[in-house]
C-alpha cells in the first residue's frame, strides 16, 4: 500500500504564538509522524498529522482503526485496551512474520524529536527503541509519562471497539478518568488517599465500638466474682505462709551443718597441718651440710673439665705442628725436583729458539717474493655493460611474450565460447527450449536448469517442460500431436505430489511458467485393434501409440483416404481422428440427440522442427577455425620468444661467469697475502716469547734460597713441638690430683644423704596425713555448699526474708509441725471454681490491655479525621471548581445544539469511594434531565454526549493529544453537524490539545477552519498509482485521472 501524503492545511492566523506552542504550531508531546510496517492492513504507511484537529476519513475496512491501534501499541499500551486482541502478534499483517510501529513526538524544539519504535512479531515478542537505541519497556513508559500520555484513559484515548464502554462508565469511574486527564496531577493521588483514609476511619469506628462493648462486659464479670476472690486470696496467704516456712527449712538445715563443720572438721585439719610443717623443717635443716659438700665437689668437677679442655687443646696443637712439619718436608723435596727440571728445560729452550728463527726467516722471504695483484677494471666495466644490455633485451622480450600470451588467453576463451555455443545449438534439448522461447516462454531455459539443480528437494519425479518429455519419430505425427495439445501444456512442468506442486508454483512464478499436478494413476490402454473396416477407411493407428511420453494421449490417426471418406468414419464409432490436412471431430447433443461435426485445418508443426539457421552454425564454425589458426600462430610466436629468451639468458650466464672468475681470482690473491702476513706476525711473536723466558741460573738461585728458608721453618716447628709435650705432662699430673679429691667428696655426700632420706620419709608421711584431712574438709565444704545452693534455689536470703524467718520456729522439728498445721488450715477451704482467681486476674489484665488499645485507637481516629479534613480541604474545592468549569462548557455546548445538559459532582460526605461525576442530558423539550446511560439514551444521543463531554475537557486538559474513533456513528445529520461545529470551534482555541477524530464519512457543506487537517485513507488493488500522484501534492483532478487509467 502506498503511504498517504502529509496533511495539507493552512497555518493559523494567531498573531503572537502562546509560549506553549512552537513556530510549527505543535506543542510538547504532539504526534508529529506515524510510521507503520507490516501492521494490520498496511504494508507500509507514513502519516504526518496536524497539530490541532485531525479528521481521519476512509471507508470501513480501509485501516482507520489500524492507525488508532498503532498509536496505542507504539506508546506502550496493552493490547487489551483496544478490545480487539489480547496479544501483539495478532497485529502483524497476515502473511508476514514481523512488523513495527514508529511514533515521533514533538520535543522542546521543532528539530527535537522523541522517536519511539516498537518491533513486534507473530511470536508475541516486542523490542523497544528510543531514538534508535534499544531500551527496556519501562524506560519508554517513563519517557511517555513526562508528557502525561494515558492511552488507557477513555477520556484521552477512545478506540472504536471501546466507544460503547465510555457510556457504560459509572459516575465513579468517570470521575477517576477525568481526574487523570485534567486538572492538578495531585487530584488522583489525593482522591486515593481520601478513599483509603475513609476506609481506615470506618474500620476504626467499628473497632472502637467493639472494644468499648468488650470492656464493659469484662468489668461486669469481675464485679460478680469479688467475694470468691477474697476467700481465694485468704487461702493463698495461708499457702504462701506454708511455702515461706518451707523455704526456711533448708536454711535451718544449712546452719546446723555449718556449725558442725566449724567445731570438728576445721580443728582436725589445723593439727595435721602443724605436724606436717614440723617434719618439713627438720628435713630442710638436714639438707644444709650436704649442699656445702656438693658445692666443693662442683668446684673440683669444674677444674677437672678445664684441665681436660687444656689437654685436648694441647693435643690439637701438637697435631697441627706435626702436619706443618710434614708439609715443609714435602715442599723441600719439590724444590730439589724443580732444580733438576730447570737444568733439563734450558737445553730444550735453546733448541726451540734456533728453529723459531729459521721459520721466521722463511716466512718473511715468502711474503717478500709474492707479486702484487691488480684488478682488471676495464674488463670488469665491459662485462657489466654487456650484462645490462642482455637484461634489457630479456625484459623487452618478456613484455612482448606476455602480450602475446594475453592475446592467446583471450583467443582461447573466444574459441571455448564458440565451441560451447555450437554444442548448445547442436543439442536437441537446447533446440526444443529455443523453440519454446520463440513461442513466448522467455524464461523457460532458466526454469529448466533450476529444476535440474533442485531435483533432490522434490518428493516425487518432476517432468518438464512437456515438449522435452515427448519423443515423436514421424514428422506428420508430430504435427498431429502439436495441433492436438494446447500451447501452454508444452512449456508446463508436471509434478506428482501436491506439496511439490505448491513449492514449484512459488518458484516458477518469477519465470512465468505454469505448473500442473498429475494425481491419478496411469491408465493402461490396450493397443488399437485395426479392423478391416478401419483399414478400408485409411485408419492405421491411434495417436498415443505414435509417441513416447510419461502420460498417454488417446486419439486416432488416418490417411488421405480417411479424409476423402470422412463421413463414413463416424459410422464405425470413431468421433475424433486426424488426416494429413484436417482434424475431424463429432459431438452428440445431450438434449436433441443430433450429431454436430467440426473440421479444423492441420497447421504445420513449429515446436518439433528445429528453427536453427544453418548460416549461423557455418559462421560459428568459420569463427572457430579462425580462432584455431590464430592460436596456432600465437603459440609459434611464443615458442620463438622462449627460444630467444633462453639464448639471451645463456649469454648472460656466460658473462656473469667471466665476471665471477675475475672476482674470485682477486679474492684468492688478497686472501693469500693476508695469510702470509698473519704467518709472519705469528712466528715473530713466538720468537719474542722464547726470548722473554727466564734463564736457568736465576731460577736455580731462587730455588736454593727457597730450600734454606724451608729448613729454618722445620727447625722452629720442632722447638714448638718440644714445648707442647712438656705442657701436656704437667696437665696430666694436675688432672689426676683433682680427680682423686672429687672421689673422696662423693663418698662423704653418700653417707650424709642416707640420713636425709629418713627425714624426707617422715615429712612425706605428715604431708599425706594433712592432705587426707584437707580432702575431708573439702568434702564437708562441698556438702555445705550443696546445702546452701539447695537453700538458695528455694529462696535467696534478703533482709525482709530474714525478718520473716526470725518469727518462725528455730528448730527443724518445730518448723515441720508448723508447716503441716498451716497447710491443713488452707486445705480446709473448698471452692466450686478452682480457677476463679486466675480468671479474675486474666480479665483484669485484659481490661487494662483493651483500655490502652482503646486510647490508642481514639488517638488514631482523631489523627485520621484530621488528615481527611486536611486532604479534603485541598481536593474537594479544586474538584468542585473543575467540575463547575466542565459544566459551564458542557451546558453551553448543549444549548448551542438546542438541547440541554449539565455535569455535576455527586458527593457522599466521607464516602469518597462513592464520589462520581453525573452527566445529565435531555434531547426533547418535554423530557427531564436524565443521567447518561445505555438505558435512557439512544446510541446517537450517547455519541453526542460523549464527544461534547470530551470537548468540554479541552480547555482543562494537560495531555498532548486525544483520540476518538468513529464517535459520530449513529448520529442523525443535525446532531452530527452541530457536533462537528463544536469540535472545529474547540480546535481553533489556543490551548487545545491535538485531536484525532476517525470517521468513515463526513456530511457535505461542513464548515472547516485552518485548525482542521483532513487525512484520507484509501485502500484497494488499484490505489498505488493515485497514491503516488496524491503524495506528490497534485490536485484531486489529477488523482482521479490517474485512477481512471
Image (cartoon, grey):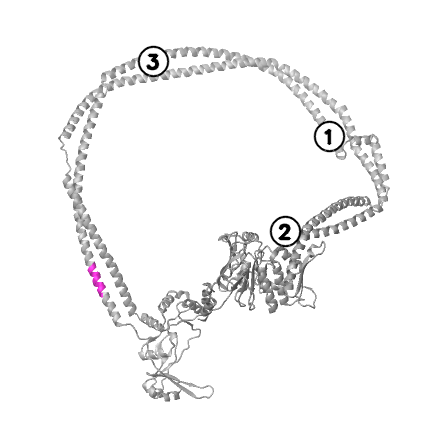
Could you tell me residue 853's position as x and y percent?
A: 75, 46
Could you tell me residue 126's position as x and y percent?
A: 52, 57
Could you tell me residue 5's position as x and y percent?
A: 48, 62
Local crowd size for mark 3, using a 10 Å CA cut-off: few (<14), some (14–19), many (≥20): some
Q: How far apart, in angstroms, are the residues tagged by discs 1 and 3?
A: 92 Å
SS of the residue under disc 1: helix
Sequence order check, earlier mark of 2 and 3: 2
Residue 792 versus residue 201 in the image, above or below: above
SS of the residue under disc 2: helix
Tell me, for residue 713, which label it has, or none.
3
Tell me the magenta residue range.
625-634
Tell me, for residue 654, which label it has, or none.
none
**Foreground disc of the pair 2, 3:** 2
Residue 212 colored in magenta in the image: no
Tell me, for residue 785, which label it has, or none.
1
Residue 553 sits in which quadrant?
bottom left
Q: Mark 3 and mark 1 in contact (Cβ < 8 Å)?
A: no
On screen, residue 31 versus residue 462, left or right, reads: right
Q: Nearer the viewer, residue 277 or 141?
A: 141
Q: Main secondary structure of the magenta part?
A: helix
Residue 629 colored in magenta in the image: yes
Q: How far apart, in angstroms, are the residues tagged by discs 2 and 1?
A: 76 Å
Could you tell me residue 974's position as x and y percent?
A: 61, 68
Sequence order check, earlier mark of 2 and 1: 2
On screen, residue 147 versus residue 828, left or right, reads: left
Amino acid at each position: 500500500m502506498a503511504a498517504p501524503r502529509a496533511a495539507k492545511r493552512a497555518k493559523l492566523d494567531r498573531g503572537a504564538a502562546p509560549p506553549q506552542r512552537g513556530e510549527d504550531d505543535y506543542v510538547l508531546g504532539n504526534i508529529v509522524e506515524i510510521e507503520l510496517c507490516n501492521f494490520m492492513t498496511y504494508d507500509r504507511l507514513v502519516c504526518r498529522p496536524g497539530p490541532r484537529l485531525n479528521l481521519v476519513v476512509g471507508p470501513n475496512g480501509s485501516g482507520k482503526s489500524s492507525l488508532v491501534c498503532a498509536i496505542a501499541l507504539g506508546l506502550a499500551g496493552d493490547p487489551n485496551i483496544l478490545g480487539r486482541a489480547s496479544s501483539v502478534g495478532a497485529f502483524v499483517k497476515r502473511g508476514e512474520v514481523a512488523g513495527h510501529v514508529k511514533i515521533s513526538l514533538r520535543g522542546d524544539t521543532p528539530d527535537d524529536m522523541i522517536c519511539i519504535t516498537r518491533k513486534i512479531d507473530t511470536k508475541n515478542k516486542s523490542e523497544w527503541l528510543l531514538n534508535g537505541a534499544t531500551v527496556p519497556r519501562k524506560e519508554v513508559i517513563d519517557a511517555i509519562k513526562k508528557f502525561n500520555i494515558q492511552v488507557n484513559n477513555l477520556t484521552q484515548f477512545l478506540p472504536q471497539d471501546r466507544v460503547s464502554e465510555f457510556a457504560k462508565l459509572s459516575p465513579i469511574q468517570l470521575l477517576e478518568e477525568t481526574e487523570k486527564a485534567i486538572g492538578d496531577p495531585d487530584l488522583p493521588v489525593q482522591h486515593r488517599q481520601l478513599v483509603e483514609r475513609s476506609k481506615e476511619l470506618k474500620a476504626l469506628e467499628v473497632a472502637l465500638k467493639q472494644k468499648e462493648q468488650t470492656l464493659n462486659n469484662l468489668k461486669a464479670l469481675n464485679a460478680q466474682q469479688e467475694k470468691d476472690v477474697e476467700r481465694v486470696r485468704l487461702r493463698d496467704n495461708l499457702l504462701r505462709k506454708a511455702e515461706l516456712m518451707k523455704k526456711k527449712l533448708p536454711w535451718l538445715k544449712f546452719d546446723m551443718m555449718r556449725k558442725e563443720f566449724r567445731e570438728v572438721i576445721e580443728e582436725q585439719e589445723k593439727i595435721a597441718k602443724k605436724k606436717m610443717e614440723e617434719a618439713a623443717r627438720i628435713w630442710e635443716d638436714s639438707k644444709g651440710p650436704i649442699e656445702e659438700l656438693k658445692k666443693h665437689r662442683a668446684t673440683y668437677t669444674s677444674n677437672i673439665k678445664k684441665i681436660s679442655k687444656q689437654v685436648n687443646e694441647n693435643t690439637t696443637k701438637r697435631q697441627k705442628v706435626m702436619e706443618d712439619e710434614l708439609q715443609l718436608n714435602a715442599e723441600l723435596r719439590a724444590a730439589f725436583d724443580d732444580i733438576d727440571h730447570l737444568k733439563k728445560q734450558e737445553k730444550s729452550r735453546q733448541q726451540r729458539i734456533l728453529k723459531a728463527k729459521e721459520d721466521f726467516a722463511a716466512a718473511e722471504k715468502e711474503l717478500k717474493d709474492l707479486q702484487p695483484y691488480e684488478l682488471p677494471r676495464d674488463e670488469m666495466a665491459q662485462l657489466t655493460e654487456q650484462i645490462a644490455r642482455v637484461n634489457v633485451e630479456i625484459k623487452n622480450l618478456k613484455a612482448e611474450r606476455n602480450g602475446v600470451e594475453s592475446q592467446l588467453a583471450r583467443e582461447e576463451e573466444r574459441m571455448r565460447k564458440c565451441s560451447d555455443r555450437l554444442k548448445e545449438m547442436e543439442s536437441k534439448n537446447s533446440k526444443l527450449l529455443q523453440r519454446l522461447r520463440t513461442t513466448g516462454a522467455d524464461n523457460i531455459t532458466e526454469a529448466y536448469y533450476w529444476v535440474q539443480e533442485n531435483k533432490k528437494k522434490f518428493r516425487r519425479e518432476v517432468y518438464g517442460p512437456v515438449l522435452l518429455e515427448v519423443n515423436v519419430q514421424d514428422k506428420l505425427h508430430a504435427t498431429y500431436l502439436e495441433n492436438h495439445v494446447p500451447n501452454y501444456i508444452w512449456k508446463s512442468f508436471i509434478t506428482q505430489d501436491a506439496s511439490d506442486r505448491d513449492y514449484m508454483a512459488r518458484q516458477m512464478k518469477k519465470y512465468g511458467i505454469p505448473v500442473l499436478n498429475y494425481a491419478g494413476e496411469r491408465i493402461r490402454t490396450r493397443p488399437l485393434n485395426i479392423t478391416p473396416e478401419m483399414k478400408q477407411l485409411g485408419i492405421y493407428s491411434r495417436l498415443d501409440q505414435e509417441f513416447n511420453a510419461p502420460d498417454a494421449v488417446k486419439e486416432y490417426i488416418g490417411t488421405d483416404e480417411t479424409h476423402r471418406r470422412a463421413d463414413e468414419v463416424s459410422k464405425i464409432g470413431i468421433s475424433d481422428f486426424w488426416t494429413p490436412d484436417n482434424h475431424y471431430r463429432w459431438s452428440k447433443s445431450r438434449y436433441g440427440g443430433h450429431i454436430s461435426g467440426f473440421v479444423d485445418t492441420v497447421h504445420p508443426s513449429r515446436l518439433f522442427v528445429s528453427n536453427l539457421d544453418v548460416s549461423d552454425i557455418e559462421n560459428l564454425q568459420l569463427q572457430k577455425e579462425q580462432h584455431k589458426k590464430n592460436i596456432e600462430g600465437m603459440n609459434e610466436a611464443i615458442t620463438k620468444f622462449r627460444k630467444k629468451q633462453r639464448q639471451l639468458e645463456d649469454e648472460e650466464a656466460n658473462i656473469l661467469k667471466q665476471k665471477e672468475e675475475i672476482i674470485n681470482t682477486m679474492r684468492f690473491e688478497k686472501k693469500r697475502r693476508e695469510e702470509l702476513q698473519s704467518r709472519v706476525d705469528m712466528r715473530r711473536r713466538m720468537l719474542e716469547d722464547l726470548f722473554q723466558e727466564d734463564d736457568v741460573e736465576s731460577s736455580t738461585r731462587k730455588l736454593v734460597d727457597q730450600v734454606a728458608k724451608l729448613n729454618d721453618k722445620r727447625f722452629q716447628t720442632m722447638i714448638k713441638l718440644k714445648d707442647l709435650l712438656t705442657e701436656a705432662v704437667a696437665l696430666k699430673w694436675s688432672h689426676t690430683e683433682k680427680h682423686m679429691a672429687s672421689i673422696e667428696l662423693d663418698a662423704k655426700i653418700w653417707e650424709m644423704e642416707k640420713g636425709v632420706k629418713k627425714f624426707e620419709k617422715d615429712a612425706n608421711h605428715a604431708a599425706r596425713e594433712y592432705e587426707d584431712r584437707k580432702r575431708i574438709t573439702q568434702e564437708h565444704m562441698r556438702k555445705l555448699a550443696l546445702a546452701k545452693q539447695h537453700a538458695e534455689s528455694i529462696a535467696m536470703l534478703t533482709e525482709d526474708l530474714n525478718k520473716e524467718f526470725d518469727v518462725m520456729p528455730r528448730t527443724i522439728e518445730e518448723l515441720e509441725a508448723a508447716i503441716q498445721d498451716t497447710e491443713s488450715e488452707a486445705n480446709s477451704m473448698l471452692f466450686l471454681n478452682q480457677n476463679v482467681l486466675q480468671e479474675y486476674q486474666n480479665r483484669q489484665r485484659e481490661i487494662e490491655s483493651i483500655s490502652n488499645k482503646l486510647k490508642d485507637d481514639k488517638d488514631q481516629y482523631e489523627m485520621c479525621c484530621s488528615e481527611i479534613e486536611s486532604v479534603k480541604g485541598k481536593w474537594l474545592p479544586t474538584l468542585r471548581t473543575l467540575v463547575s468549569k466542565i459544566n459551564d462548557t458542557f451546558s453551553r455546548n448543549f444549548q448551542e445544539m438546542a438541547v440541554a445538559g449539565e455535569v455535576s459532582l455527586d458527593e457522599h460526605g466521607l464516602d469518597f469511594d462513592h464520589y462520581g461525576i453525573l452527566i445529565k442530558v435531555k434531547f426533547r423539550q418535554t423530557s427531564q434531565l436524565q443521567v447518561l446511560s445505555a438505558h435512557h439514551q439512544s446510541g446517537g444521543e450517547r455519541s453526542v454526549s460523549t464527544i461534547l463531554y470530551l470537548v468540554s475537557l479541552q480547555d482543562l486538559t494537560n495531555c498532548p493529544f486525544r483520540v476518538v474513533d468513529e464517535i459520530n456513528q449513529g448520529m442523525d445529520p443535525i446532531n452530527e453537524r452541530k457536533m462537528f461545529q463544536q469540535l472545529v470551534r474547540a480546535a481553533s482555541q489556543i490551548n487545545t490539545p491535538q485531536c484525532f477524530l476517525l470517521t468513515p464519512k463526513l456530511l457535505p457543506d461542513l464548515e472547516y477552519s485552518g485548525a482542521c487537517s483532513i487525512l484520507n485513507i484509501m485502500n484497494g488493488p488499484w490505489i498505488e498509482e493515485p497514491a503516488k500522484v496524491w503524495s506528490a501534492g497534485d490536485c484531486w483532478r489529477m488523482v482521479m485521472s490517474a485512477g481512471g487509467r
